[in-house]
Image (cartoon, rainbow, N blue to C red):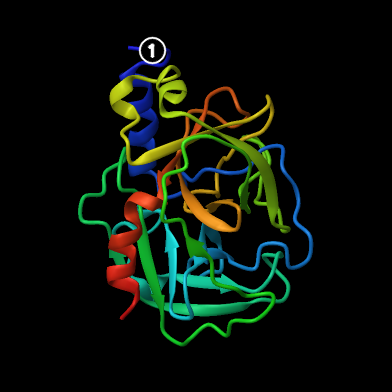
Amino acid sequence: MHGISVLAVSLCLAVAAASPSWRQRITGGQNAGEGQFPYQVSLRDQQMVHFCGGAILNNRWIITGAKCVNGMDPANVLVWTGSQSLTRGGTNHQADRIIIHPNFNYLANDVAVVRVRTPIVLASDTFALQMANYRLDTALGAVLSGWGRRSMGSPAFPDWLQYLSVTIISQEECRDHFNDELIPDVVMCSAYPAGQSACVGDAGSPLVYNGELHGIVSWGMSCGGLHPDVFTRVSNQRAWVLAHTMQ
């Protein structure tokens, strides 16, 4: 047993399950450059309200977190592509299919794929991201992007896409912060300087290293880097994702 109790994390995850407004977000990030993250998408409801991030896999499919779309009707999900702004430029795509990993729970296999009704036009500002096919144990300089709020008290999501450079830490180091059973082999963790982390609005957003998708924002204990953030490990999910998105 290490650090935070199972009860504390369970309560955090129970809130996630009960409240559709709970999502993680980027705290302490900086503005993305024009075209810097062409694979990033915003998931929105029919009122055009952002609720999660995701990444383009090909011209029909995007990848996100299962928590983001679990129980949702595709008719109520829009996929926004091609802009760093939530309000300017970009293109909305109506979702027509959602597939949740069959073994999804709030600690593992937090991954889903969403198909759009009409093909995404791939270009320099709208580009597909390759999934990593190897396990990344530790690394410096991975990049997390998303539209999550900048702090717990922020009244709204930032209009402009934010990003952070993060450090991928080992499974053992991550487990030192949590109970061991909370960090299965199918997740990975990142550490930040104080004042930086994923936060509300960033769930489902991509973690990229060397131009490949390695992680999907899953859960965390705080905004501001007091504890590691936990990501779905994409290399473990790659075969499942390909089996459903090559159709």
Q: Where residue 127 appears, x then y in whole percent?
A: 60, 73
Q: Is residue 93 above or below residue 237?
A: below
Q: Quadrant of the N terminus?
A: top left
Q: Where residue 111 appears, x then y in whole percent?
A: 35, 54
User: Which residue of the protein is positioned furthest toward the left in this rendering?
Assistant: 102
Residue at the image position 35 percent from the left and 30 percent from the top? 183
Q: Where residue 205 appears, x then y in whole percent?
A: 52, 53
Asked if residue 67 can be seen in this view, the reply is: no
Q: Nearer the viewer, residue 223 or 142?
A: 142
The quarter holding residue 153 reads top right
Q: Name the kind of residue labelled 1 in the image.
A: His
Asked if residue 244 can be seen in this view, the reply is: yes
The quarter holding residue 133 reads bottom left
Q: Where residue 221 appears, x then y in whole percent?
A: 48, 28
Q: Secondary structure at mark 1?
A: loop
Q: Nearer the viewer, residue 196 or 134?
A: 134
Number of numbered markers: 1
Residue at the image position 39 percent from the left and 52 percent from the top? 235
Q: Nearer the viewer, residue 88 or 212?
A: 212
Residue at the image position 53 percent from the left and 54 percent from the top? 206
- The local crowd at label 1, few if under 14, some if 14 to 19, many if 20 or more residues have their Cα within 10 Å, is few
Q: Is residue 240 above or below residue 23?
A: below
Q: Nearer the viewer, residue 129 or 86?
A: 129
Q: Quadrant of the C terminus?
A: bottom left
Residue at which label 1 appears: 2
Residue at the image position 46 percent from the left and 87 percent from the top? 118
